[in-house]
Image: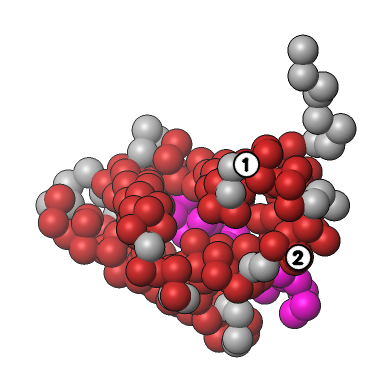
Amino acid sequence: MGRAPSYDSTTVVQAARDVFWDQGLDGASLPDLERATGLNRSSLYHAFGSKRGLFDAAVEDYLGTVIRPRLRPLVEAARRTPPEAARAVVAYFEQLASAVGQVPADSPRRGCLLMGCATGPAGHDDALRAAVDAYRAELTDALVGALRAADPALADGVVEQRARLLLSLQLSALALARVNQGESVAMLRAARDQAAEWVSRDA
């Protein structure tokens, strides 16, 4: 019977996640990952198969602990009354702006892990492109559901266009967060204000 690992897998994955978040898939070296996780490369490869396997685990943790908890109120808003759904959309962007504004300048958790990796050389990786596209679709679906609940009379095409515009602002802001935190926050609050204008005008 094999000996149980002497480390906590979640702690290791989250330490690696922050390295990938800060340095990207290509920029994160094995020595960086060894230092962050406290494991040598033999242990990392035994547990995750490869650096890419560790990255995939880090992405799943990022989605599960960072993205989906923040999206949950939007997803739930799809089943709410129009006023409740409208408030959820506005609150989502305000809370995201506040979260971005509170990240210390030297934190590895600036911007978006997936978007940061996608804009580097790893963006040519088919599996990474698929992960980013699935991430974008998940965000879009949450926004579409909440916006549709906020005004059930709106045509589907209008709802989808609004979701795309808001998501474009969000992703642009998160890309900018690494170099200009203040402007990133301003863009997210512009998305909040645009959403508020739409839902109040349609009420």
Residue at image location 78% in from the left, 58% down from the top? 34
Indicate left or right for 81 with 161 as reference.
Answer: right
Check disc 1 and give the amino acid type: Phe
Q: Residue 191 occupies which quadrant of the picture?
A: bottom left
Please state the horizontal and vertical placement of residue 180, each as a whole percent of the image: 60, 87
Describe the element under mark 2 as helix, strand or loop. Answer: helix
Q: Residue 44 versus residue 103: which sits nearer the camera?
A: 44
Q: Residue 52 versus residue 203: which sits nearer the camera?
A: 52
Give neighbour class at mark 2: few <14, some 14-19, many 20+ (Cα, 10 Å): few
Indicate left or right for 11 with 177 as reference.
Answer: right
Residue that mark 2 sits on: 31
Please state the horizontal and vertical placement of residue 97, each as a whole percent of the image: 58, 69
Residue 101 in the magenta stretch? The answer is yes
In the image, residue 84 above or below residue 163: above
Q: Residue 203 versus residue 115: which sits nearer the camera?
A: 115
Q: Distance from label 1 to label 2 (Cα)? A: 16 Å
> Quick check: can you spot residue 129?
yes
Residue at image location 81% in from the left, 23% down from the top? 4
Q: Which residues are magenta?
A: 87-108
Indicate left or right for 199 with 77 as reference.
Answer: left
Describe the element under mark 1 as helix, strand or loop. Answer: helix
Q: Is the magenta region chiefly helix, strand or loop?
A: helix
Task: State how many labels appear.
Answer: 2
Sequence-first disc among 1 and 2: 2
The disc label shown at residue 191, or none:
none
The disc label shown at residue 48, or none:
1
Check disc 2 and give the amino acid type: Pro
Q: Residue 26 occupies which quadrant of the picture?
A: bottom right
Please state the horizontal and vertical placement of residue 182, each as a whole percent of the image: 62, 84
